């Protein structure tokens, strides 16, 4: 799959060095995968939690951070919708952000 706006992750890493290794590994894992369904994402990336509208929530660094993406499974594109701390995640609606 291809992360179309990976710059969001790269910028986040610059200001949150403590999560750089985990987010870099996430990018590598996702870009090597070829998932066609939410179930395949969950099978390939255990910290993934599929939600409605082709979105997936990933726990990063022991749930310290959360990452929300939207996936177009037909063409293999991943679009980063949001990234932040777990505390900030509690203030948003993952299905609409």
Image: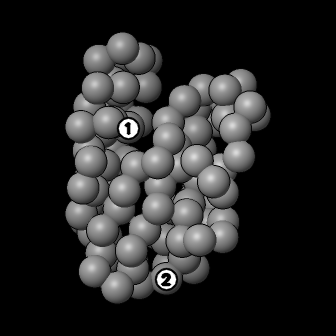
Q: Residue at x 28, y 80 (%)?
A: 75
**Residue 79 x %, y %:** 37, 56
Observer-nearest of 18 and 15:
15
For residue 36, which quarter of the picture?
A: bottom left
* Disc sitting over residue 61 in the figure: none
Name the residue carrying label 1.
Answer: 23
Up/down of 91 relative to 41, above or below: above
Considering the numbered disc 1 on the image, is that residue within a helix, a strand or a loop? helix
Q: How is colour applied across the structure in the image? A: one colour
Q: Earlier in the sequence, mark 1 or mark 2?
A: 1
**Residue 59 x %, y %:** 59, 44
Task: Determine whether, in the image, residue 58 is placed left or right of residue 89.
Answer: left
Name the residue carrying label 2.
Answer: 37
Up/down of 87 relative to 58, above or below: above
Most extreme residue toward the front is 96
Observer-nearest of 90 and 49:
90
Q: From the image, which quarter does the N terminus lie in? A: bottom left
Q: Which residue is drawn at 35% across and 62% down?
A: 78
Residue 67 seen in the current view: yes
Question: Residues under labels 1 and 2: Cα distance?
Answer: 22 Å
């Amino acid at each position: 799959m291809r992360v179309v706006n990976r710059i969001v992750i790269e910028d986040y890493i610059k200001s949150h060095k403590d999560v750089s290794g985990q987010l870099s590994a996430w990018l590598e894992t996702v870009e090597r995968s070829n998932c066609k369904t939410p179930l395949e994402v969950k099978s390939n990336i255990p910290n993934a939690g599929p939600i409605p509208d082709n979105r997936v929530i990933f726990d990063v660094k022991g749930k310290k951070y959360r990452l929300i993406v939207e996936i177009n499974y037909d063409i293999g594109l991943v679009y980063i919708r949001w990234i932040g701390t777990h505390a900030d995640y509690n203030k948003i609606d993952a299905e609409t952000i």
